[in-house]
Image: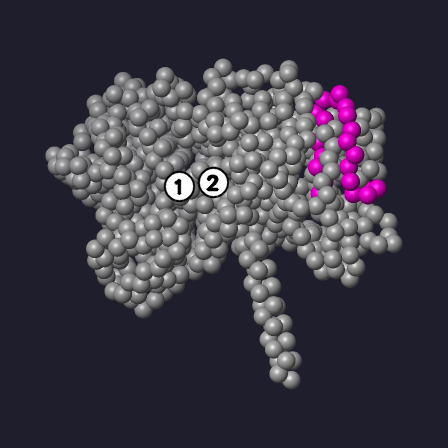
Amino acid sequence: MKNLKHIHLFIIAVLVFTYVKAQENQWPVLKSYDQAHTDRIAMPVGGIGTGTVSLTGRGALEDWEVMSRPAKGYQPKYTGVEVINRAPFFSIYYKEAQKEAKALLLEGPVPTKYDEGYYGSKAPNHGLPRFAEATFQTAYPFGQVLLKDKEVPVQVTVGAFNPLIPGNVEDSSLPMAVLSYKVKNISNKPITISLAGNIPNFIGFDGKEGKSYQNINTYKSENGIKGIHYTAGKDVDKESMQWGSFSLTTNSPGEISYRTAWQPGEWGNSTLEFWDDYTDDGLLEERTSKQKNNMGSLAVKTTLAPNQEKDIRFYITWHFPNRAAWRNDKENVGNYYATQYKDSWEVAQKHVARIPELEQKTKTFVNAFINSDTPEIIKEAALFNLAHFRTQLAFKTKSGYYLGWEGIKDNEGSGDGTCTHVWNYEQTIPFLFCDVAKNMREVEFQYATNAQGLMSYRIHLPLKTKGTNFGLAAADGQMGSIMKYYREWQLSGDDEFLKRNWSNVKKAMEFCWIPKGWDPDKDGVMEGSQHNTMDVEYYGPNPQMGLWYLGALRATQEMASYLGDRKFAKTCESLYKNGSQWMDENLFNGEYYVQEIVPPMHLDSIAKGLIRVKRRLVADDPQYQLGEGVLVDQLVGQVMAHILDLGYLVDKENIKKTNESILKYNYRDNLMKHPNFMRSYAYGDESALLMAAYPNKRPKQPFPYYTEVMTGFEHTAAVAMIYEGQEAEGLKTIQDIRNRYDGKKRNPFNEAEFGHHYARSMMAWAGVLATSGFHYSGVEKSMKFTAKPGTYFWSNGYSWGTCEVKNKEAILTVLSGKLELKRFTLNGIGTKKLRGKVVDENESLAIKL
C-alpha cells in the first residue's frame, strides 16, 4: 500500500508538471472569434518599420506588405493560368496505418466574399481541400487559428507572431513572421504527417508595381536552419522598392524535403503534379523550371504518437532595402532595418535561434497586460490598435528617422509627412517605445521647424534638404507637438533631449504671436486662421484649438521653468491664465464649448503659411466652420493635459458637463436614419458618436466631416469621460467602436479613417492610462496610480510591469528594465518619499502609504 501511495503521488506530480509545461507553451488569449466572425480578420505580423504579412481568420497568409508599400489583399501568384489563383499556402499530409494518405490546406472554409467571380470563386487556392471548421483566438501580437474537422484525425492550431517587447525597439523590429503549426493526433493510432510551405518567388512585383521575373530559388542548410532562399533575377532593378530577398526556413526536427521549383504544366497540371508527389509519401522531390515566379516548397515530415502534439515551425524573413520618399520614386530614403543585415537569410541566421527567448518575453508582456484589472474592452482596443504601428503605416529611414503616413490605402500610403494634427492623438508609442517617440519629436523640431518657428505639419523627405518645404502650419498640430515634446522629456527624464531642441520648441510657441498669426494680440486666445485636423481653417476662438493652445502654454511654462528661463515661463503662465478664464467666460454656453466665428475679411489679414486652400475663403462669411456645434473631440487638449499631469486647463465642472453634452447630442444608437454626406465608417444599425451635432444654429456648410464617425475621435471622447469619472459612459463608447470591428464586418486590427490602420486610433492606449491613473515622470522619478484596488499594467516606454493596489498599499513589480523612484503616489490617498529607490527587473517593491 505504501508503494502504491508513492506511485499515486508520482503520477499526480507528473500530471501537474505536464499541465504546467503545457500552460507555459500556450499563447495568451484575450479574445476569441467564432467561424461566423473570421472573414475579415487579417492580423499584421511583422516588426516596427519592416513591413508585414497578415494571418487571416481562416489560417491563410495574405496582405504581403514587405516591399515598402501597402498591399491590402495582395496574394503573390505562381506563374500559370490566372483563374487558378495559386497563391502562397501551407498544407498538411497525413497517413494513418492501413489508410490512404490525404492532404489538406492548413486553412478553414473559403469566406463567402470570394464566392462570385466571372470564372467562379475568386479565392486564393480555391479548389484545394481544407478543414471544415476554423475559429480565431488572439492577444496581439499572437494570433491563432484552431482548425478542426470530424473526418480528419488531427487538430491543428495555426499560429503567427512577431516579437513585441515594450522598451526593446531592436527586438520588436525584426523583419520576420514566426509561424507555429501545432498538430495534435486525436486518434488512438500513430499518424505520419508532413507540413509543407509553398511560396512563389514574387520579387519584382509588390501588388501594384513591377512585373514577374525569372528569379532564383536556392535551398540552403546552415547552423541547423534549412529552407528556401528567394533572390532576385538579374533583370530586377536594384534601386526599385521591389528588389530584395526573402526566405522560408525551419529549424524543426523531422525529415526535410524541398523543391526550388514546381514542374511546368498547362492548366492546373503544375499543382496536380505537386499534389501527387506530396500525397505519395509526404516528401517532395526537386524539380527545375525556367518559369517566372517559380514556386519554392519546404516540407517537414514526422510521426505523431496517439494524443501527441508537436509544434512545427516555419519562419518567413525578408530584406527589401529601398523605400521611396513618400510617393517620390526618384528619392530613395531606404529602410533602416535592411542596413542591419546582408539579406533575408542572414535575418534567419541571426534570429531564429533567439525566438524562444523573445517569444517568452513577448508572452510575459501580453500576459501581464491582459491579466490586469483594466476593463476588457480597453485592453482589446489598446492592444489591437497597437498593431497599426507595425504595418506600413510607419517606417524608419536608413538614416535612422521614424516617419509615418496618416493611414494606408490598399496599395499606397494615405496622407504623407507624419501629419502632426493626426499623430497628436497617438498615445501608444511613447508609453511602449519612448525612444521612437523621441526620435519623431527630433524630426518635428530639428527638421520640420523653420527659423520663424513655423512647423510644417507635413514633413517632406529627405529631411536635411526638404524637411520644411511643405511650409504650412496647423494650429492643433504645432501645439500638440509642443505637448508631445514635454511628454517625451518627462517619460525619458533626458535633460539633454530637452536642451537640444529647446530653442525650436520656444520658437514654435512664439510663432503663435506673430503679426496676423494665431494669437497676434498675445492674450492667450487663438483667433487667427487656424488650420486643423478637419482639413480646414477655423476663424475665431474655438475649443479644439483653444485647449491645445492652453496645454502647450502649460507644457512650455514647465519646460522653461526647469531650464531657468523664468521670463518666458512667466509669459506662458500669464497667457494660459488669461486664455483659460476667457474660454470659460466666452465659449462655454452652459452645456459645451462653441466656436466664436470671426471672419478674416481679407487674405491680407492672414500670415503666410496659415491657410492651405486660399480659394475656399469667403472673407466675410467663411465656410467650413464649427460654429455652435457640439464637437466630439473638443476636449482633446484637456485629455492630453491629463495624460501629462498638467491639471485642468479650464473649469472642471465645464469639462464634465461637456462630456455629458457630447453623449446627449452626438450619440446615435442606430445610424439607419442618420444622413451622412461624406464617408461611412459606421452605418445601418451600428451605434456611434457623430463628429458633430447641432442642437442650435448650424452653419450652412459646416466643416466637411461633421456627419461622419471616426474611431480616433471616439476614443478621444471616451478617454475624456473616463478621466472625469464617467467610466461607464466611456467604456460604452469604446465598446461601440469594437462592436463594429467584430471580424465579420471589419478587421479587428484595422480601425480606419483616411486609410487603413489609421494613426489617430492609437489614442486607444490612453484608456489604459485613464483607468489606472498612471503617470510617470523620469525627471522627478515619480509614479502615480489610482487608489482603486486592483492590479494594473504600467509602461513608461523603457521599463514595464504591474502595480497591485490594495488598502493604502501598492506592490510595484518590474518585469522588464529598471526603475528608479523618489516618490510614489496613490491618487487621493497620499505620497510616499522613497529616496531614489531602484527596482530591478523581476523585483517587487511594497509601498505603504
Residue lying at 62% horizontally and 46% vertically, measured from the top left: 180
Residue lying at 32% horizontally and 47% vertically, measured from the top left: 643
Q: Is residue 205 above or below residue 707?
A: above
Are the residues at dot 1 and dot 2 in contact (C-beta closer than 8 Å)? yes
Q: Mark 2 Cα within 10 Å, few/some/many (few <14, many 20+)?
A: many
Q: Which residue is mark 1?
A: 433
Which is nearer the N-term, disc 1 or disc 2? 2
Give the farthest residue toward the bottom: 1
Q: In the rendered view, does 617 fall on the left or right side of 341? A: left
Q: Identify the secondary structure beneath mark 2.
A: helix
**Looking at numbered disc 1 in the image, what kind of residue is underneath it?**
Phe
Q: CA distance from mark 1 to mark 2?
A: 10 Å
**Looking at numbered disc 2 in the image, what kind of residue is underneath it?**
Ser
Q: Quadrant of residue 588?
A: top left
Q: Mark 1 Cα within 10 Å, few/some/many (few <14, many 20+)?
A: many
Residue lying at 72% horizontally and 29% vertically, measured from the top left: 260
Residue 280 highlighted magenta (yes or no) = yes
Residue lying at 16% horizontally and 39% vertically, measured from the top left: 561
Find the magenta span and give its range: 279-300
Give how far across and how far down residue 407 sits, in percent: 49, 33
Q: Quadrant of residue 705?
A: top left
Give how far across and how far down residue 567 sits, in percent: 12, 34
Q: Is residue 50 above or below residue 7?
A: above
In which quadrant of the rendered image does the N terminus lie? bottom right
Which residue is more in the foreground, 732 or 63? 63
Q: Which residue is mark 2?
A: 172
Residue 724 in view: no
Give how far across and how far down residue 834 sits, in percent: 23, 57
